[in-house]
Image (tube, helix red, strand yellow):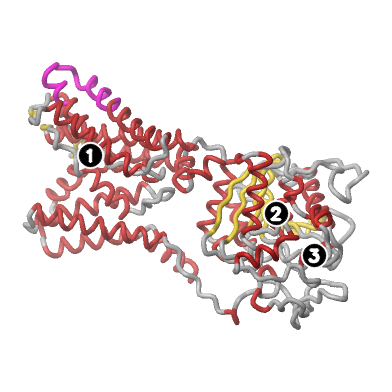
C-alpha cells in the first residue's frame, strides 16, 4: 500500500499537477461566482475551446519532437485570410477551401521544419523569423482589412448541432483521439519521442531525425490550419490579426500539461487539461469583470511560472553522499576506503595480494533484487560443465507466445565478486514488461579462474541461449548484452562478435552455435586497463589504485598491471577486437566516476568511430553521475536504454 501511495504521489508530482490545478480552479471560480458552473457558461467554455484544443494537438507533435513553433499564430492569419477571401470572392465551396487551407498549413510548417533540421538552426529563432514573414504576407493579402460574412455552408460546422453540441466539438474529439493513437500506438509516434528525447541518439539508432522533425512541423502546420478553419466557422470574420496569440495559449497549456520544452516527454491528456486550465482562467476573469489588459498580465505570469516549473522539474536533484553509509559498488569496497599506493587492502575486503582469492568474505552478499513477483522464471539454468558458476537465470514475460527479444545482464564486481541476482536486476527485469526475456548470467570469478575464463563463460552462455532459444521462447537473432563496470567490459566483449575459435582459449575447439549478439550496452566499464591510473591522475576525480597487485584488474589478468605489458593487457580489452563484425553499441558513463575513469568510455567511443564509423556507437554521458550511480538504474535512464534497444531490434 505504501509503495502504491508513493507511486501515485510521484505521478501527481510529475504528470498529475495539471489535473489538480484544473480542479482547484473550478472550485475557486465556482465559489466566487455562482454563474461559473451554469449550463450556459459551461457550454460557452466548451465551444470556445474547440479550435484551441485542435491547435494544441499540433503543438503536441512539434514540442514532443523537440522543437517549438512560434510562427503558428501568424500561419493562422495567412490561412484565415486566404481562405476567407477565396470564399467571399470566388464562391468556391467549403469542401474545396478546406483542403487549400490544410495544404497551406502543411507547406508553411514544412518550411520551418526544413530550415531548422537541414541548417541545424534552433527552431525558436527560425520560427520567430518566419513569423515575421507570414505576418507580412497576411497584411499584404488583406490590405489590413477585415472580411466577414462567411457562407452558411462553411459555418455549418459550428452552427449545426448534434445532441445539443456543435459539430466542431465532435471534430475536436476525433482529432484528439487520432493524435493520441499516433503518438502512443504507432512507430512514428515512438520515433517522435526518441527524436525529442535525443535527436543525435535517435539518428545513430537508425531513425531519420531530420525527416521526423520536418514532419512534426508539417503536421503542426496542418492541424493549425484545421483549427483556423474551425475558428472562422465560429467567429465569421477574418483579418491579419486573427490567430496570433493562440500559439502562446497553446504553449503555456502544453508546459502546464506536462510537455517538456526540451522535448521527448508529454501526453495528449495533459495538453487538453492545460488548455482548459487556460480557458477557465480567461473565462473566470471575464466573469469577475477583469479587463483585457489585466488578463494579458496574468497569462504572462502563468507562462513564466510554467516555464520555470518545467525547468526545475527536469533538473536532477543533487545527491548527498555520506561516506560512512555509502554502499560498495557491485560488492567492491567503497572507493573512499581503497588503500593508498603501496599499502595492503583493509580488513574485510577480499585478499588480493600474496594469496589466492577464494571468493567474497564469508557471509558477504551484495544487495539483491526482488524476483518474487516474476511468475515465469527458470533459475540457475546450467550452460557449462566446468564450474557450478556457469549458470543463468531466465525470466519470461507473462503474456505472449514469443519469440521474444532477450536482454542479457552480465553482473559487475571487479571480475572478483558479485552475483547474477544483484539489485541491478530490479531495473533490468522491467524488460519483461516491455515484451522481452530478461536473463542474468553468472560466470567464473577471478578467484576461481583468471582471464579469459569470464569472457569464455559469457560467450558460452550466448551459445547456450541461441541453441535453446525455442525452449525459452527467445528470438536468437535479437539478443542484447548489457552490463555495468566489469559487466560492461564483458558486455562490450560480446558486442564485438568475435567468431568461434578466434578468441584466446577457444583455439581448435568446435562449437554448434555462434556467440553473437544483436546489440551491446556498456555502462561505465573498464576498457583500457593499462592507462586507467594515468587517466585517474589526469582527471583528479577517479581513485588511483588499478596498478596495485591487489587491484581487481591485476587479479583478473593474473599479474600486477604495473608489470603487465600492453600486449598482455590487450586481449582483455574489447577495443582490441573492434571490426565491422561488431554489433551497434550504447555506451554510458558518469562524468564524475570515482572508480573507472570517465575517459575510458570517451577513448572507447573514439576508437569505434575511427575504425568502423559513428553509426556503430551511441555515447550518452550522465552528467554528475558516479560509479554505480542510481541515475543509471532509474526510470528515466532505463527508458532511454529500452528506447535504444527497441529502435534497433
Residue 561 bears which disc, if any?
Answer: 3
Query: Is 384 on the left-hand or right-hand side of 370?
Result: right
Tell me the mark number nearer the camera, choosing from 2 and 1: 1
Query: Is 476 on the left-hand or right-hand side of 326?
Result: right
Q: Residue furthest right?
A: 508
How many residues crowd around disc 2 within 10 Å: few (fewer than 14), some, or many (20 or more)?
A: many
Residue 73 bears which disc, if any?
Answer: 1
**Residue located at (30% from left, 48% from top):** 272
Give the magenta-colored segment's residue range. Answer: 84-103
In x, y percent, where is residue 579? Answer: 73, 40
In-front residue for pair 614/91: 614
Tell me, yes or no, whether the highlighted magenta stretch contains residue 98.
yes
Say which residue label 2 marks: 439
**Residue located at (78% from left, 67% from top):** 416
In x, y percent, where is residue 424? Answer: 63, 63
Q: CA distance from mark 2 to mark 1?
A: 52 Å
In-front residue for pair 529/401: 529
Q: Is residue 94 above or below residue 287?
A: above
* Labels 2 and 1: the sequence-earlier one: 1
Tell me the mark number nearer the camera, choosing from 2 and 3: 3
Amino acid at each position: 500500500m505504501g509503495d502504491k501511495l508513493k507511486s501515485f504521489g510521484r505521478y501527481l508530482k510529475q504528470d498529475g499537477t495539471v489535473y489538480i490545478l484544473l480542479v482547484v480552479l473550478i472550485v475557486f471560480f465556482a465559489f466566487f461566482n455562482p454563474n461559473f458552473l451554469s449550463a450556459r457558461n459551461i457550454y460557452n467554455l466548451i465551444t470556445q475551446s474547440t479550435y484551441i484544443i485542435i491547435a494544441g494537438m499540433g503543438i503536441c507533435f512539434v514540442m514532443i519532437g523537440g522543437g517549438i513553433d512560434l510562427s503558428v499564430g501568424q500561419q493562422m492569419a495567412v490561412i484565415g485570410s486566404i481562405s476567407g477571401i477565396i470564399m467571399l470572392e470566388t464562391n468556391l465551396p467549403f469542401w474545396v477551401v478546406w483542403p487549400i487551407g490544410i495544404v497551406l498549413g502543411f507547406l508553411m510548417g514544412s518550411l520551418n521544419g526544413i530550415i531548422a533540421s537541414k541548417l541545424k538552426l534552433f527552431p525558436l529563432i527560425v520560427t520567430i523569423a518566419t513569423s515575421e514573414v507570414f505576418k507580412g504576407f497576411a497584411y499584404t493579402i488583406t490590405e489590413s482589412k477585415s472580411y466577414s460574412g462567411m457562407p452558411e455552408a462553411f459555418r455549418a460546422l459550428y452552427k449545426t448541432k448534434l445532441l445539443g453540441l456543435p459539430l466542431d466539438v465532435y471534430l475536436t474529439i476525433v482529432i484528439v483521439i487520432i493524435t493520441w493513437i499516433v503518438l502512443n500506438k504507432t512507430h512514428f509516434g515512438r520515433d517522435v519521442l526518441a527524436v525529442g528525447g535525443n535527436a543525435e541518439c535517435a539518428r545513430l539508432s537508425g531513425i531519420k531525425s531530420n525527416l521526423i522533425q520536418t514532419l512534426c512541423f508539417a503536421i503542426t502546420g496542418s492541424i493549425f490550419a484545421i483549427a483556423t478553419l474551425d475558428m472562422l466557422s465560429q467567429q465569421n470574420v477574418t483579418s491579419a490579426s486573427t490567430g496570433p496569440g493562440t500559439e502562446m495559449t497553446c504553449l503555456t497549456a502544453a508546459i502546464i500539461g506536462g510537455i517538456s520544452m526540451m522535448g521527448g516527454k508529454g501526453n495528449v491528456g495533459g495538453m487538453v487539461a492545460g488548455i482548459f486550465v487556460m480557458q477557465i482562467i480567461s473565462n473566470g476573469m471575464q466573469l469577475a469583470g477583469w479587463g483585457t489588459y489585466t488578463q494579458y498580465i496574468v497569462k504572462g505570469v502563468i507562462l513564466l511560472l510554467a516555464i520555470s516549473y518545467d525547468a526545475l522539474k527536469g533538473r536532477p536533484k543533487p545527491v548527498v553522499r555520506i561516506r560512512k553509509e555509502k554502499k560498495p559498488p557491485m560488492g567492491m569496497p567503497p572507493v573512499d576506503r581503497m588503500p593508498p599506493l603501496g599499502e595492503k587492502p583493509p580488513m574485510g575486503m577480499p585478499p588480493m595480494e600474496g594469496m589466492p582469492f577464494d571468493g567474497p568474505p564469508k557471509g558477504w552478499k551484495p544487495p539483491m533484487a526482488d524476483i518474487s513477483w516474476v511468475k515465469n522464471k527458470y533459475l540457475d539454468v546450467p550452460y557449462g560443465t566446468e564450474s557450478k558458476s556457469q549458470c543463468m537465470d531466465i525470466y519470461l514475460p507473462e503474456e505472449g507466445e514469443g519469440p521474444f527479444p532477450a536482454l542479457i545482464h552480465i553482473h559487475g564486481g571487479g571480475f572478483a565478486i558479485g552475483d547474477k541476482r544483484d539489485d541491478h536486476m530490479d531495473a533490468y527485469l522491467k524488460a519483461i514488461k516491455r515484451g522481452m526475456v530478461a536473463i542474468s548470467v553468472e560466470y567464473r570469478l577471478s578467484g576461481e579462474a583468471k582471464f579469459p575464463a569470464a569472457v569464455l563463460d559469457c560467450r558460452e552462455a550466448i551459445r547456450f541461449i541461441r541453441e535453446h532459444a525455442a525452449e525459452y521462447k527467445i528470438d536468437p537473432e535479437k539478443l542484447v548484452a548489457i552490463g555495468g563496470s566489469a559487466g560492461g567490459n564483458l558486455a562490450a566483449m560480446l558486442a564485438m562478435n568475435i567468431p568461434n575459435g578466434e578468441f584466446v582459449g577457444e583455439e581448435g575447439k568446435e562449437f554448434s552455435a555462434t556467440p553473437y549478439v544483436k546489440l551491446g550496452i556498456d555502462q561505465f566499464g573498464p576498457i583500457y586497463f593499462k592507462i586507467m591510473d594515468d587517466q585517474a591522475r589526469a582527471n583528479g576525480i577517479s581513485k588511483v589504485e588499478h596498478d596495485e597487485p591487489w587491484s581487481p584488474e591485476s587479479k583478473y589478468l593474473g599479474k600486477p598491471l604495473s608489470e603487465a605489458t600492453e600486449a598482455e593487457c590487450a586481449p582483455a580489452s574489447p577495443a582490441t577486437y573492434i571490426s565491422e563484425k561488431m554489433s551497434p553499441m550504447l555506451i554510458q558513463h558518469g562524468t564524475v566516476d570515482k572508480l573507472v575513469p570517465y575517459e575510458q568510455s570517451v577513448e572507447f567511443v573514439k576508437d569505434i568511430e575511427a575504425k568502423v564509423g559513428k553509426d556503430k556507437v551511441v555515447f550518452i554521458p550522465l552528467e554528475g553521475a558516479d560509479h554505480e550511480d542510481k541515475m543509471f538504474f532509474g526510470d528515466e535512464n532505463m527508458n532511454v536504454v529500452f528506447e535504444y534497444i527497441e529502435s534497433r531490434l
